[in-house]
Image: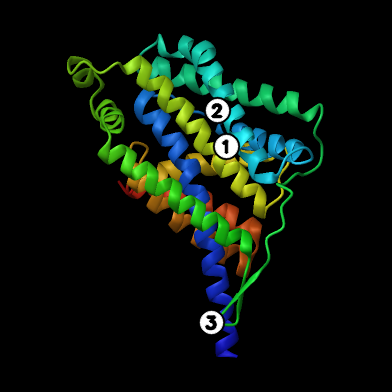
Amino acid sequence: MATNTLVRIGALLVDGISIGLLYAMLGLGITLVFGLGGVLNLALGAFTVIAILLTFELTGSVPVVVAAVIAIAVTAAFGLFLDRTLLQLVYRSEGDERLLLGIFTTLGLSIALQGALSLRYSGEFSVPIHIDTVELSGAFIRGSSILIIVASLIILSGMYLFFSRTYTGLATRTIMQDETGALFCGIDTKRMRTFVFVLSVAIAAVAGVLYGTSFETSVAGAFDLTITAVIVSIVGGVTSILGVVVAGIGLGILTTFISAYLGAYISTIALFGIAIGALLVKPEGIQ
């Protein structure tokens, strides 16, 4: 009996870590854009769904890996188009005015994208790929969970090296800490904002494709993914990259166990409760 309980806990822990890493990537997408440009991107979840749908459509013509790469590239290119058009209008404002304008602009964008996608796509979709379950010490681990963990760790490690070892990454962190100081150092903040927004969309697209290997989602699910990303970003600290990663993994494990033992509805409530508690007790986030 005790052995079965430990095996079940082990399997849930692996699932929780995989979901937590997806949460971390979604939260990172929110944190990068907000930290650098002061814009809360409420359309982030729509990009994840677009990547899933593109992969789903392309898989009939090309291998699933190629389809995923094309879907991520197309979604990132769409993000570049939106940055050069819609978001440039937002960046003309400053302070609270930019924050509010960004919220309404990206919220309106999210609603418009979901409305347009709903005209063609109803029901739920996933990435059509089969990955065998793996038995590990008596525990049956989903192959998709292992894929998500490996791919997410590679991407997040790459992000860490990028932000800590490259000039562009260090310049990005400088702007997040002190935009005025960065301008005096000769850093092109406008170009960096565009780069970071496209990077955040690409990360969201990767997270979407990985999410689609394990779960189904609908067009309306974009809103849930956005809210989850915002909660992770709040708990981690909206300008802390490391804090967001830690918060994502922690929340992923916590919600997986709550969902398994108390139900998905309770886990959703717990997610909001944690966000409220974090704002009351530690408003600056984990950092």
Tell me the distance, in whole angstroms, between the alpha carbons under discs 1 and 2.
8 Å
| Secondary structure type for disc 3 | helix
Left or right, residue 90 beside residue 132: left
Rendered location of residue 189, percent (x, y)? 32, 17
Nearer the observer, 217 or 133: 133
Dot 1, crowdedness within 10 Å: few (<14), some or many (≥20)? many
- Please name the residue shown 54% across and 75% down the image: 9
Residue 147 seen anywhere in this rendered image of the structure: yes
Marks 3 and 2 close (CB-CB < 8 Å): no
Nearer the observer, 124 or 224: 124
Dot 3, crowdedness within 10 Å: few (<14), some or many (≥20)? few
Using the image, tell me which numbered label, if any, was put on residue 205. 1
Q: Disc 3 or 2, which lies upstream in sequence?
A: 3
Using the image, tell me which numbered label, if any, was put on residue 76. 2
Name the image quarter holding the N terminus.
bottom right
Tell me the distance, in whole angstroms, between the alpha carbons under discs 3 and 2.
42 Å
Q: Disc 3 or 1, which lies upstream in sequence?
A: 3
Q: Is residue 89 above or below residue 103?
A: above
Tell me the distance, in whole angstroms, between the alpha carbons under discs 3 and 1.
35 Å
Q: Check the image and tell me how it is coloured.
A: rainbow
Rendered location of residue 34, percent (x, y)? 40, 29
Q: Which residue is mark 3?
A: 6
Looking at the rendered image, the disc whose residue lies closer to the viewer, 3 or 2, is 2
Marks 1 and 2 close (CB-CB < 8 Å): yes
Quarter of the image holding residue 261?
A: bottom right
Left or right, residue 72 beside residue 187: right
Left or right, residue 188 beside residue 153: left
Marks 3 and 1 close (CB-CB < 8 Å): no
